[in-house]
């Protein structure tokens, strides 16, 4: 509840109306921190500040609801979330909200469509990397990689077929398994949040939830028929300029990169996106940005393409009718057709 109080203050502080704005609309922005362990920006063109605050409230409430449902680290009183599901692996089925069912079914579909590159049952492996990374951030001198034997053991407990979804419940058959929906949840949640604002009447807005951008309509400014979404230079030193811009109207633009969540061992950077084939961080590309009207698919695809070869990625894009921008380690930029 403390988070909500802070956000309301931020919402009421935000206001500005640049000169090009048309038709009695104003452009408003607000910032949130803390949801999905990341920064969220909401921009909208509305007739009044009260309208903006109302839409912002809806977006934030939806994101927070999803954040709690998909949280694997924290429990919330009276709520069965993914931590509850993980805690009951091998014990019993857990009754969950239909949004959890929907997201997990999407996760299983993602596994099938990506040939296993995206695996929401990879919790045991991801946990070892997460622990090594957080330990290292607290104590960089002693940064180390997870032990490969431990990773291989953990990988034995990542069977997607051991997720049993039935009549509003989820059961993890294998007591050693656990779910991690980090690759798909933010896009899914941001898509749901934007849809809720649209249903409530929002015509023109943009959410950026930690690199998951959803653009609704077009900016209400003279001469603009799309939003412009910048792609960051994927450098790890914090001085990130924009190296490309993607025009977006009624679509999602999602970037996965190795340059934001990572740690360093002996001068080598290890990011948070793990290739299930090697159990090591994917290192093929510096970043991949996916443009796709379906926000959940865009999030899933950006992680998948970050892991995959260019060729496999192109084929997957075609299946989903999506586009992508790859940034290579030498800074060169290439695009799908
Ligand atoms: P971000 O969270 O930085 O926006 P992504 O959408 O690319 O980035 O998701 C990365 C997260 O997905 C990781 O933090 C981890 O929780 C999870 N993850 C990493 N590799 C995989 C994978 N191969 N399959 C499924 N989930 C993964
Ligand atoms: Mg993703």
Image (cartoon, rainbow, N blue to C red):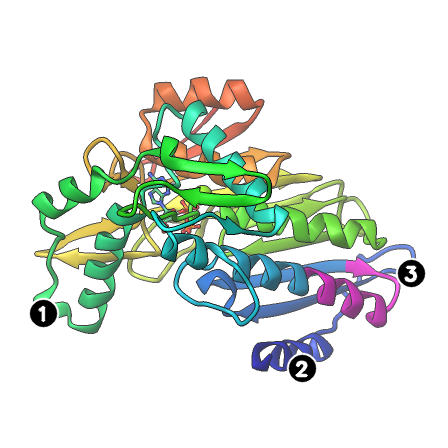
What distance separates the C-alpha of mark 2 from that of mark 3?
A: 25 Å
In this rendering, position of residue 263 left or right of residue 335: left
Q: Residue at x 83, y 55 (%)?
A: 200
* Closer to the eye: label 1 or 3: 1
Q: CA distance from mark 1 to mark 3?
A: 57 Å
For the question of whether residue 58 can be seen, the reply is yes
How many numbered discs, if any? 3
User: Is 249 covered by the magenta stretch?
Assistant: no
User: Callout 1: few (<14), some (14-19), or many (20+) C-alpha neighbours within 10 Å?
Assistant: few
Q: Which residues are magenta?
A: 45-59
Residue 278 locus on image (x, y percent): 19, 34
Of all residues, the one furthest to the front in this rendering is 92
Local secondary structure at mark 3? loop
Q: Which mark is residue 9?
A: 2
Q: Secondary structure at mark 1?
A: helix
- Residue that numbered label 1 is attached to: 141
Residue 337 seen anywhere in this rendered image of the structure = no
Q: Residue at x 18, y 65 (%)?
A: 136
Which residue is painted at 41% across and 30% down in the image? 111
- Assign a secondary structure to mark 2: helix
Q: Looking at the image, is 77 positioned above or below residue 67? A: below
Mark 1 touches mark 3? (CB < 8 Å): no
In the rendered image, residue 245, in percent from the top left (x then y), is placed at 54, 42
Where in the figure is residue 186, as x and y percent of width and height? 52, 51
Q: Label 3 belongs to which residue? A: 24
Left or right: where does residue 70 sit relative to residue 46? left
Which mark is first along the chain, 3 or 1?
3
Q: Would residue 52 be counted in the magenta stretch?
A: yes
Image quarter of residue 55? bottom right
CA distance for labels 2 and 1: 40 Å
Q: Earlier in the sequence, mark 2 or mark 3?
A: 2
Q: Report the residue at 60% width, 69% height from top.
A: 31
């Amino acid at each position: 509840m403390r988070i909500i109080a802070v956000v309301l203050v931020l919402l009421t502080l935000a206001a500005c109306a640049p000169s090009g704005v048309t038709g009695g609309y104003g452009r408003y922005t607000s910032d949130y921190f803390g949801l999905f362990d990341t920064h969220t920006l909401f921009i909208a063109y509305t007739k009044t500040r009260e309208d903006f605050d109302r839409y912002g409230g809806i977006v934030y409430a939806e994101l927070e609801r999803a954040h709690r449902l998909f949280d694997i680290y924290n429990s919330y009183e009276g709520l069965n979330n993914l931590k509850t599901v993980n805690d009951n692996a091998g014990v019993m089925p857990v009754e969950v909200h239909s949004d959890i069912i929907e997201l997990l079914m999407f996760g299983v579909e993602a596994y099938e469509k990506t040939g296993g590159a995206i695996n929401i049952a990879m919790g045991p492996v991801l946990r070892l990397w997460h622990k090594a990374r957080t330990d290292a951030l607290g104590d960089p001198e002693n940064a180390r990689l997870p032990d490969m034997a431990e990773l291989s053991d953990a990988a034995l407990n990542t069977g997607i077929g051991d997720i049993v979804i039935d009549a509003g419940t989820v059961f993890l058959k294998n007591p050693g398994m656990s779910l991690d929906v980090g690759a798909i949840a933010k896009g899914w949640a941001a898509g749901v949040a934007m849809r809720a604002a649209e249903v409530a009447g929002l015509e023109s807005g943009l959410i950026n939830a930690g690199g998951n951008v959803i653009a609704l309509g077009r900016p209400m400014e003279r001469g603009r028929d799309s939003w412009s979404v910048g792609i960051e230079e994927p450098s790890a030193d914090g001085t990130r300029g924009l190296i490309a811009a993607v025009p977006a109207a009624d679509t999602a633009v999602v970037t996965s990169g190795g340059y934001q969540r990572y740690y360093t061992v002996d001068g080598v950077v290890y990011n948070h996106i793990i290739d299930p084939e090697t159990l090591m961080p994917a290192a093929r590309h510096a970043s991949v940005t996916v443009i796709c009207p379906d926000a959940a698919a865009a999030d899933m695809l950006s992680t998948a393409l970050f892991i995959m070869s260019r060729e496999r990625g192109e084929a997957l894009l075609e299946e989903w009718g999506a586009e992508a921008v790859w940034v290579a380690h030498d800074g060169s930029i290439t695009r799908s057709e």
